[in-house]
Amino acid sequence: MYKDYSMEQLLELQKCLQKEHADFAAQGLKLNMARGKPAPDQLKLSEAMLRDDLGDCLAADGTDCRNYGVLDGLPEAKELLRPMLGVAMDEIIVGGNSSLQLMYDTIMMAMMLGVPGGKKPWSRYDHVKFLCPSPGYDRHFAICQSLGIEMITVPYHDDGPDMDMVEKLVSEDEEVKGIWCVPTYSNPTGISYSDKVVKRFAALKPKADDFRIYWDNAYCIHHLDDKHDVVLNILDECKKKGSENMVLMFASTSKVTFPGAGIACIGASKENIDYIKSKMTYQTIGFDKLNQLRHVRFFKDFNGMVKHMELHRAIIAPKFDVVITTLEKEIAPHAIGGWHAPKGGYFISFTGFDGTAKRTVELCKQAGVVLTNAGATYPYGNDPYDNNIRIAPTFPTVEELQKAMEIFCCSVKLATVEKMLEI
């Protein structure tokens, strides 16, 4: 282990690693792992959808999907997606291709118009705060930052966010209006929330009467293992506590069919759904019903979507295996980093020595591998320990990924040795 090396041994190791890194850089590689994008082979799985003839373009109830109308989504599209959230037909809205847009829109509604049960719009408070379990999803944090919402970092445990901290902040501070959650295969940690954590969320007693849990179920059917994680239904748990208005749930087919042309949904209590629909009527006459119909006819039902995800798994599971196997071979013996081997999702979160993440990302870039910026998994891009890096293995080929991970591990080692020599 590196911690047992003498100064002379570390200096010699540094020279060897510098040469190895220079050799990688000389190869002129260009490998981009900055975002969790489906690979081209994954996108091909849904291409038949684009060739399907929709015929008369009529929904099951006779709605002409070419024309105006149906604000909250086709009934058959609701039926297709509602198992992703575990909601009833009157507890879901099917929108366009982006669940992120639905999240942004609901926050803007809360900022400008308020929410059911609230005294006034969020923007009329002196400060609005959101809790941000971290490492977390950079685009969640970007929404808050763009709207001037103060973000408070909440650490992760092995079964979800630090609920002691969440309960304390929510119960004591009326300015805390929400929390971001990715409950299944969290981005980027890959951790799924335990039953205990979900029940504690449902039992929250917010000081703010307009507090909302933003439950982003982005990876709820993105399994990599037969023994996949199962997370409790947060809306059901909230109903048991009489707090069903506290949660808003989101999902999409962005990484199921086409990221640029999927369908997204929001699930919530009927009161919340009715309220959102009443505001949406000024925003749109309806989302893309032809695309909703296309998805319904392609999958037939939710079981068809589940089977489709098994095809995705066959493509990306070997890539996750490459990452984990390489880390176990190159990093674990030296005790210079940690990670969680997820059972699903799109990312692997790597935690190295404090003060090495930015340097590791820089070294990778010099050798032709582009990663998500160090710090991006924390609010304001500020990782207080500078030790977390998000690995996104889905887009490269297996061969490209193997090379990228060799470069990554070399960079981790070199950044670690440099940091040890500073001490």
Image (spheres, helix red, strand yellow):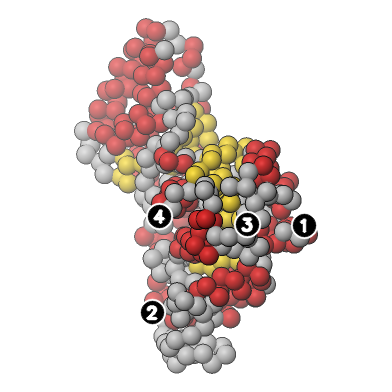
x, y percent for residue 92: 60, 71
User: Mark 4 sits on what residue?
Assistant: 37
Q: Secondary structure at mark 3?
A: loop
Q: Which callout, 1 or 3, points at the residue further toward the start of the chain?
A: 3
Q: CA distance from mark 2 to mark 3?
A: 46 Å
Earlier in the chain: of badge 3 and badge 4, it is 4
Residue drawn at 47 percent across, 30 percent down: 384
Quadrant containing the C terminus in the rendered view: top left
Assess disc 2: are there few (<14), some (14-19) or many (≥20) residues with their C-alpha within 10 Å of its C-alpha: few
User: In the rendered structure, which amino acid carries the disc numbered 2?
Assistant: Arg
Point out which mark residue 51 bears. Answer: 2
**Residue sitting at x 29%, y 26%:** 20
Q: Nearer the viewer, residue 125 or 244?
A: 125
- Residue 111: percent from left, percent from top: 51, 59
Q: Quadrant of residue 342?
A: top right
Q: Earlier in the sequence, mark 2 or mark 1?
A: 2
Which of the two labelled residues, at mark 2 and mark 4, occupies the earlier sequence position? 4
Q: Which residue in the protein does label 3 denote? A: 210
Q: Which residue is mark 1?
A: 241
Sequence-first tag of 1 and 4: 4
